[in-house]
Amino acid sequence: MSSLLEISPEKLARLIGTPQCPALIDVRIDEDFDADPRLVPGSIRRDYRELQLLTDDLCGQAVIVVCHRGKKLSYGVAAWLRNAGIPADVLEGGFEAWAEARHPAVPASALRKRDEQGRTVWVTRTRPKIDRIACPWLIPRFVDPNAVFLFVAPAEVEAVAERFGATLFDIDAPVRWSHRGEFCTFDVMIEEFGLATEPLLRLATTVRGADTARLDLEPQAPGLLAASLGPSRMYAVPRSLAAAASPALAGALFAASFVLGRS
């Protein structure tokens, strides 16, 4: 049973991807991380020795600290954070217990280099519809909570990616993060980020059905398509779109898929 200062892997797995999930920081030393270079979804690696930077960056957030086995390292970091007024708990058993329970884990090799502020930067075309809405919903919740998304004119996408060190996604070119055969970009991300859980796979089928006009793949696909069309026509650059209606719908679909997956 978890102590008062711990959260079990099972409970954390239910929180990841939801608005209730705390900030997740992985403080494993390099030797332990190199032995299994994957991350709890949504977590960010941080150096446990940079406590002042940690407290500054995490101010106002609740935090879960992940180390190798959930012992002295994560307990010490969590205690320092609580001393700074930041609610902080420890992942029971650390990453080792998470992996043993076969919860999803994101391979570090799948992650693009971060910018000087520690963020991944992504770029795609303006006027996004299904796939280019679903991917910016997925990444901050399961891959990089600080991710930045740039939406630019189609003719400028590749040049912007080169100039600003951004990762291309869902464009009409043979890039890593785009359609593969019958699968759309969201499917590819689910697979390569190690996120192939039943709820996300079901959501991926819904996204694929709506994005590729195969509305019979999942009952929710026609609704997702209809809900995406209006905002896409209203907003060429989806600052408000990506933060509002369609991502909220994707979140609702994820929650529904999660419930159905456990029923």
Image (tube, rainbow, N blue to C red):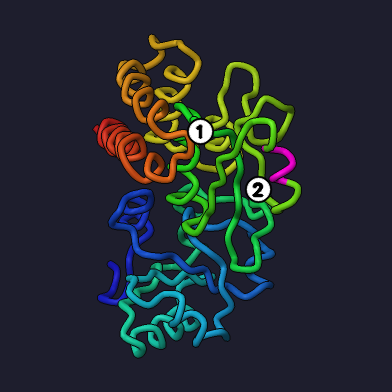
Q: Which residue is mark 1?
A: 132
Crowd class of label 2 (few under 14; some 14 to 19; many from 20; radius 10 Å): few
Give the image location of residue 98, x and y in percent. 46, 58
Q: Amino acid at mark 1?
A: Arg
Q: Residue at x 31, y 56 (%)?
A: 11
Q: Which residue is mark 2?
A: 110
Above or below, 97 against 71 in this view is above
Q: Is residue 15 visible?
A: yes
Magenta stretch: residue 131 in it?
no
Above or below, 46 against 167 in this view is below
Q: Which residues are magenta?
A: 157-161
Pick whichever, 85 or 248, lies toward us: 248
Crowd class of label 1 (few under 14; some 14 to 19; many from 20; radius 10 Å): many
Q: Is residue 11 left or right of residue 168?
A: left
Pick whichever, 63 or 230, lies toward us: 230
Give the image location of residue 216, x and y in percent. 38, 9
Give the image location of residue 261, x and y in percent. 31, 32
Give the image location of residue 187, x and y in percent. 53, 30
